[in-house]
Image (cartoon, grey):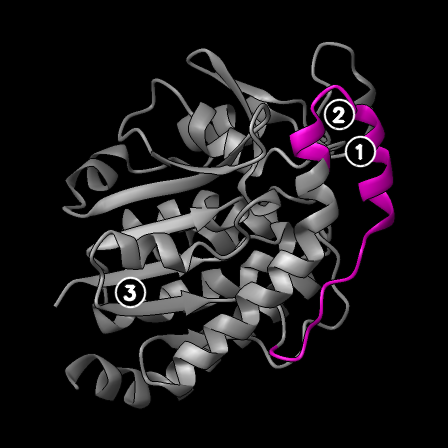
Amino acid sequence: MKLGMTFEGGASRTLFSCGVADAFLEEGLMPDYFIGVSAGIAYGMSYLSKQKGRNLRLAKEYMTKKEYQGVRHLLNKEKKTFYNVEYVFGEIPNKLLPFDYSAFAAYPGKVVAAVTNIHTGEAEYLEVPRDNTSYDVVVASCALPVLFPPVKIGRRYYLDGGLSDSIPFKQAMKEGCDKNIVILTRERGYVKKAEQAAKVSSFLYRKYPRVVQALKERPEKYNDCMKELFELERAGKVFVIAPDDMHSVGRTENDPVVLERIYEEGYWKAKEQMAALRHYLDA
């Protein structure tokens, strides 16, 4: 058996996945292949390094700080990001709330981030470096238009992987995973609609018509992806864990009480479904 695990993004909503991940750590559950998109890969790394509780502490102690996120960073000509990248991906993991790079490097499986090629508008799947020399791949996967500028990796520029593949479980299947766990950050009945920000993004990236097209097609592609995922779940081919209610939490939510509530929901949802998950894995 080769176990694949997919984490959807969703910025602050991904605290649900963090709760699920910590429950998995208590159960000793680790995949052979991990793929995440946007915050799904950013938070997923603490799971793979077996740092239980690190993401919750990050949310409660650091996401509330003005150094972490805010419009002032977006308007800063040197930063141009809503999230302070140097602080979030540099100072926090390297100084304030140490990330265990050795444990992450020791994880024996494959770690992949979904990104969107700005020139083709298509998804690409890049391996995440196992050291602290570069966090560009993870930042690229998180680089939502308007909130981030494109991220250069090699000769190409990339944006948030969710623009082209919001829930990249099919990539895990292509990599030979015959058992797959998918963690969502939206309710099962959620239907994605066109967002107002997409109009602004389309204007900003008008020189890249394929990205503009990806932005326009995103709601339909997302809804089709969810439909296919649940069909596979009913067929017993994937195991899905999803929140019952995200309480209309936005992607930039930073209230520690709200974030902890989302985390707890993920933790207990995983515990409730653990017996069924074990049965799926053993079948």
User: How many angstroms separate mark 1 from mark 2 (CA)?
Assistant: 5 Å
Please name whichever residue, 270 or 185, is drawn nearer the observer in this view of the structure. Answer: 185
> For mark 2, what is the residue?
205
Does residue 35 show up?
A: yes
Percent across and percent down for residue 13 are 62, 59
**Amino acid bearing label 2:** Tyr
Q: Residues within 10 Å of mark 1 (few under 14, many from 20)?
A: many
> For mark 3, what is the residue?
25
**Amino acid bearing label 1:** Ser
The local secondary structure at tag 1 comes to helix
Classify residue 260 as left or right of residue 115: right
The local secondary structure at tag 3 comes to helix
> For mark 1, what is the residue?
202
Q: Compared with residue 119, is residue 176 higher up or lower down, i.e. above or below? A: below
Q: Compared with residue 155, is residue 40 higher up or lower down, i.e. above or below? A: below
The local secondary structure at tag 2 comes to loop
Residue 193 in magenta stretch: yes
Task: Provide the residue span drawn in magenta.
Answer: 188-212
Classify residue 105 as left or right of residue 1: right
Upstream in sequence: badge 1 or badge 3? 3
User: How many angstroms separate mark 1 from mark 3 (CA)?
Assistant: 40 Å
Label pair 1/2, CB-CB below 8 angstroms:
yes
Q: Quadrant of the C terminus?
A: bottom left
**Amino acid bearing label 3:** Leu
